[in-house]
Image: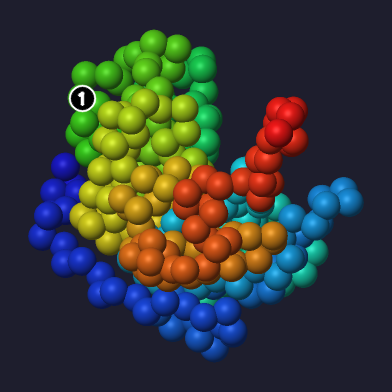
């Protein structure tokens, strides 16, 4: 195992990052891995993002929560250039990626790993081949190097002995781990998670939450976790951002969110709908 993985437990944790305000500008990039300013995106007639401002400090884990269809995954795709905004800026390690060419974006994407909601494994490839795919795409052809790096990832993900299995033979949790191994094999400085516990039972979800936290602590990576699972968010996050009606409505520590008296936040946390379910609305005569 190489030194960066062998010495996981010796790495100090990064310092805590102060909560960001919504008035960030590029000259406040110091200390931030990612900074988003005034991001706007309209799809068809629907305005999905209406001026998103967000700062993510180096080494911190930020959970982005919000209602289904509220733009969380759209925001995530913007962070690696899979979608282009109508307006705004996205700064990654001091570089504004808006209007970057695909060639320049490729160098940015080397710094950012992403775990897609469905894991996005290649059905025709084994576990080992899936994990090695980013290295092959980057030009690595030495079979010995590939085997060594894949073996390291299998150990980190606690998947030893699974390298020859096909995705169809994996459980949901195992697919997530393989997808995550593939996303970090090139040792990115940031990992994006799109609904990492979606479709998993509570026990497997808890194991994925612990894995996310362990990777952040051991590797010192910056992590952004998009989720509507509040247990997931409170378990893994240093800070939580609530995306509401296309804007960041709240940013702060998990405990600040728990204790907030704001009715919009509390309605979301408690799962209360906007509608009052009166007897008439339910079709019951009073």
Residue appearing at x 36%, y 45% in the figure: 231
Residue at (57% x, 79% y) in the render: 22
The part of the image, by quadrant, that contains residue 264 is bottom right
**Helix, strand or loop at disc 1?**
loop
What residue is at 42 percent from the left and 64 percent from the top? Answer: 257
Q: Residue 138: give x, y in percent of width and height.
A: 48, 44
Rendered position, 227 above or below 284: below
- In depth, the one of 71 and 28 nearer the eye is 71
Residue 99 can be seen, yes or no: no
Count of all numbered marks drawn on residues in the image: 1
Residue behind mark 1: 160
Horizontal and vertical percent position of residue 20 = 47, 78
236 left or right of 99 in image: left
Callout 1: few (<14), some (14-19), or many (20+) C-alpha neighbours within 10 Å? Answer: few
User: In which quadrant will I find the C terminus?
Assistant: top right
Residue extending furthest front? Answer: 286
Q: Is residue 48 visible?
A: yes
Answer left or right for 126 relative to 282.
left
* Near-viewer residue (121 or 247): 247
**Model colouring:** rainbow
Quadrant containing the N terminus is top left
């Amino acid at each position: 195992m190489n030194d960066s993985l062998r010495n996981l437990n010796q790495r100090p944790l990064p310092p805590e990052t102060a909560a960001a305000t919504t008035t960030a500008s590029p000259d406040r990039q110091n200390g931030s891995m990612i900074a988003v300013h005034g991001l706007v995106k309209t799809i068809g007639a629907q305005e999905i993002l209406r001026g998103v401002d967000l700062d993510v400090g180096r080494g911190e884990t930020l959970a982005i929560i919000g209602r289904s269809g509220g733009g969380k995954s759209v925001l995530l795709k913007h962070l690696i250039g899979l979608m282009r905004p109508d307006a705004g800026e996205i700064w990654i390690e001091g570089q504004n990626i808006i209007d970057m060419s695909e060639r320049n974006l490729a160098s940015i994407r080397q710094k950012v790993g992403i775990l897609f909601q469905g894991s996005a494994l290649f059905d025709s490839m084994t576990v080992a081949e899936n994990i090695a795919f980013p290295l092959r795409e980057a030009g690595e052809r030495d079979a010995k190097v590939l085997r060594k790096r894949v073996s390291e990832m299998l150990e980190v993900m606690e998947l030893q002995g699974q390298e020859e299995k096909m995705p169809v033979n994996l459980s949901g949790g195992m697919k997530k781990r393989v997808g995550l191994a593939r996303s970090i094999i090139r040792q990115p400085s940031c990992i994006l998670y799109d609904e990492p516990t979606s479709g998993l039972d509570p026990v497997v979800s808890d194991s994925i939450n612990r894995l996310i936290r362990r990777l952040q602590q051991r590797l010192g990576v910056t992590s952004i976790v998009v989720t509507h699972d509040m247990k997931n968010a409170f378990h893994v996050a240093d800070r939580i951002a609530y995306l509401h009606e296309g804007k960041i409505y709240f940013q702060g520590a998990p405990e600040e969110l728990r204790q907030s008296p704001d009715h919009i936040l509390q309605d979301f946390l408690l799962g209360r709908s906007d509608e009052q379910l009166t007897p008439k609305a339910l079709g019951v005569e009073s």
